Image (tube, grey):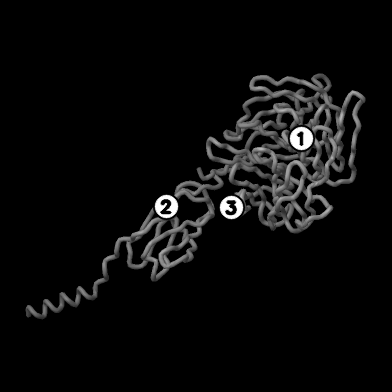
Amino acid sequence: MQRVLVLLVLLAACDSPAAPREFVGHLGATDVWSGAEVVVVSPSFQTALPHVRIGSDTLSVRRLDDSTVVAQLPDGNGTRTLTIETAGFEPFSADVTLYGLRSIETGPLLAGYLELIPNTTRVLGAGDGLVEVDVRTGNVVRHWDETVHSADCISSVGPSVRVGYYVLWGKDSVGGRCTHPWVWHYGLTTLDRVDSLPAVPGAWGMAEIGPRGIIAGGDDVLRISHCDSAGCTPQTYFNQGGGLGGVSIARSANRAFLHHWFGFIVDATTGDTLGRLPLGPGGSPATQPFYHAENVAFSAGEDTAYVVGNIGASGSILLRILTSTGALIDTLPLTNTYATDVRVDDTSIYVALLKGSVGVNATRPELRIYDRANLQLIATLRAADADTLSPTEWHQFRLVPDLVMHAMYLVATVQVVGFDANAKILRYDLLP
């Protein structure tokens, strides 16, 4: 009987499953871009791919080598628990922090093209009068009435070739009619009216070039006037299509770049036009201008300009040019997108765009981050499918960097003169 019992015990031991072994491995990084891939290294992956999930969502996994796999992370923001399950091994869990779109908030009344106040997260725009908005909080921090600036007169706040000066256009305090634009000096505690400028009825945007010159444009009209002691000599372009959305000025290079349908490059001292942005439809060198030249950003030394524009049926394009001459350095097609704005820092290019199709059908916001050295894509930070921004409703977009909070904000506003709407503010958290 004793022999039989011993035999039964041995047989039972052979039939019982082996205890799972401890998982030995590690993640390549725990701070990662939203929608990117996370690397997982472990010798337990030699025989089979692991099952990787975040919560109840199973992630796509692919093999790099016998001991390394990568898992495709979801879009999102914040800390999540990543669980790895491999046959024969205990489950392994680790926290990963996704950096991406944190929130979409409704901001205050804002219209038109916004001017960034340097070295802050604040913008100047047309709201209920002139407003200074801190996009980090979404709050109006300073406000002036419509005698200073009114969206009924011109929607956009304009830049000046002079640092700390802006072009504003307000109403008469008695009759409530639009007067004419003025250049104002914007200080930390004061706002002082300095010089008057000639009015351009129907203008969407204006800028001051020096001395006392203007760039102004409305629907199908662009006017560049250079004024001196003998008066002002206007240069007016008709039938260009669209209108002037805004102007970016590289003061050290004395260059002004005109946004929207024109794509002109202007000498910011004399007002002379130096040509147009050097790409046409399809993204190949051509004499035609952009279909849209949306926004421009400059390198720290302002020697290089980065332009995003829309080129018709093929989508959008990122253009890198020499600021002084407009000569083309390189380009990057952005297929099936509607590009809206661009920012640069020492290492990266940030491109805001709408994804989904071409033109007005592109509605899903994305922030793409590229390596400045080689234009290679680093990250794509997406919104949810339900979070849309139609370019037929939101006409102007501005990226605002936040170096303190390691964030980038996208502010969307309407463009139409005389029409106000609450802005949309998207906050993206960036890898520190």
Q: Position of residue 71 (x, y in %)?
A: 48, 60
Q: Nearer the viewer, mark 1 or mark 2?
A: 1
Residue at 74 percent across and 28 percent down: it is: 162
Circle 2 Cα neighbour tier, 10 Å, few/some/many (<14 / 14–19 / ≥20): few
Q: Earlier in the sequence, mark 3 or mark 2?
A: 2
Calculate the distance from the C-alpha at mark 3 to the C-alpha at mark 1.
Answer: 34 Å
Residue at 40 percent across and 57 percent down: it is: 83
Per the image, the residue denoted by label 1 is 254
Q: Is residue 177 visible?
A: no
Q: Position of residue 2 (x, y in %)?
A: 7, 78
Per the image, the residue denoted by label 3 is 380
Circle 3 Cα neighbour tier, 10 Å, few/some/many (<14 / 14–19 / ≥20): many
| 42 up-or-down from 352: above or below | below
Residue at 72 percent across and 47 percent down: it is: 321
Q: Amino acid at mark 1?
A: Asn
What secondary structure is found at the residue carrying circle 2? strand
In the visual, does 93 lie left or right of 367? left
In the visual, does 42 lie left or right of 237? left
Q: How many marks?
A: 3
Calculate the distance from the C-alpha at mark 1 to the C-alpha at mark 2.
Answer: 52 Å
Name the foreground residue: 283 vs 132. 283
Name the foreground residue: 343 vs 13. 343
Per the image, the residue denoted by label 2 is 81
Q: Earlier in the sequence, mark 3 or mark 1?
A: 1
Q: Amino acid at mark 3?
A: Thr
Looking at the rendering, which quadrant does residue 51 occupy?
Answer: bottom left
